[in-house]
Image (cartoon, grey):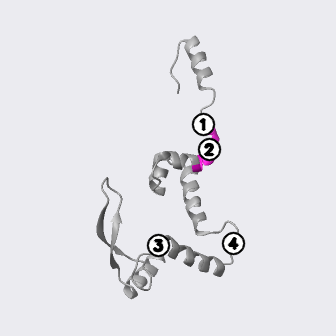
Amino acid sequence: MVDEALRCHVGEFPPVEVELLDITQRQTRRRLVPLLFTTTRGNPFTDRTWSAEWVKWRERADWPKEHGGFHALRHFFATTLITNRADPKEVQQALRHRTLQITLETYVHFWPRRERRRGVVGEMLRRASAGTPELS
């Protein structure tokens, strides 16, 4: 179904080569990228373009407006990664946060509590007194 819809889209609207900034390497550079989805003028979708479209789609679907902004999808994506045991560094990279600190400060409360270490020092002392100092 999705592949059929994409084939129809590409048939009607072939990819448009657009010059974009590539920030995936150490040095930022410009390169041509073929985009499948562009504005009616052939420009890339920006955050404002997506937000405006999202409002229309949300209204057509009769979804609630409260906490239903386009940015909420980003948080949904992040929390889905986290609750499915993604490494914090992977979440940072997927969200394109500049530092890991930004990711952790924003989402630390979503990491499952059962995986957080508690009583590490006490456990080490107990193991040391028993002759097995390594933590598992």
Please report whichever mark, 2 or 3, sits nearer to the chain's N-terminal start: 3
Q: Main secondary structure of the magenta part?
A: helix
The answer to whether the residues at label 2 and label 3 have Cβ atoms under 8 Å apart is no
Is residue 8 shown above or below 47? below
The answer to whether the residues at label 2 and label 1 have Cβ atoms under 8 Å apart is yes
Please report whichever mark, 3 or 1, sits nearer to the chain's N-terminal start: 3
Residue 76 x/y as whole percent: 59, 60
Q: Nearer the viewer, residue 96 or 80?
A: 96
Q: Nearer the viewer, residue 117 or 50?
A: 50
Q: Label 3, label 1: how many angstroms apart (C-alpha)?
A: 37 Å
Q: Secondary structure at mark 4?
A: loop
Pair 4/2: label in front: 4
Specify the amino acid type for callout 2. Answer: Pro
The answer to whether the residues at label 4 and label 1 have Cβ atoms under 8 Å apart is no
Q: Secondary structure at mark 1?
A: loop
Q: Label 4, label 2: how many angstroms apart (C-alpha)?
A: 28 Å
Q: Secondary structure at mark 2?
A: loop
List the residue tagged with mark 1: 116
List the residue tagged with mark 4: 65
The answer to whether residue 7 is visible is yes
Q: Which mark is residue 46?
A: 3
Residue 7 x/y as whole percent: 40, 81
List the residue tagged with mark 2: 112
Specify the amino acid type for callout 3. Answer: Thr
Q: Label 2, label 1: how many angstroms apart (C-alpha)?
A: 7 Å
Residue in view at x 69 percent, y 78 percent: 62
Specify the amino acid type for callout 4. Answer: Lys
Q: Label 2, label 3: how many angstroms apart (C-alpha)?
A: 33 Å
Q: Secondary structure at mark 3?
A: loop
Please report whichever mark, 4 or 1, sits nearer to the chain's N-terminal start: 4
Instruction: Give the extent of the magenta segment.
Output: 106-114
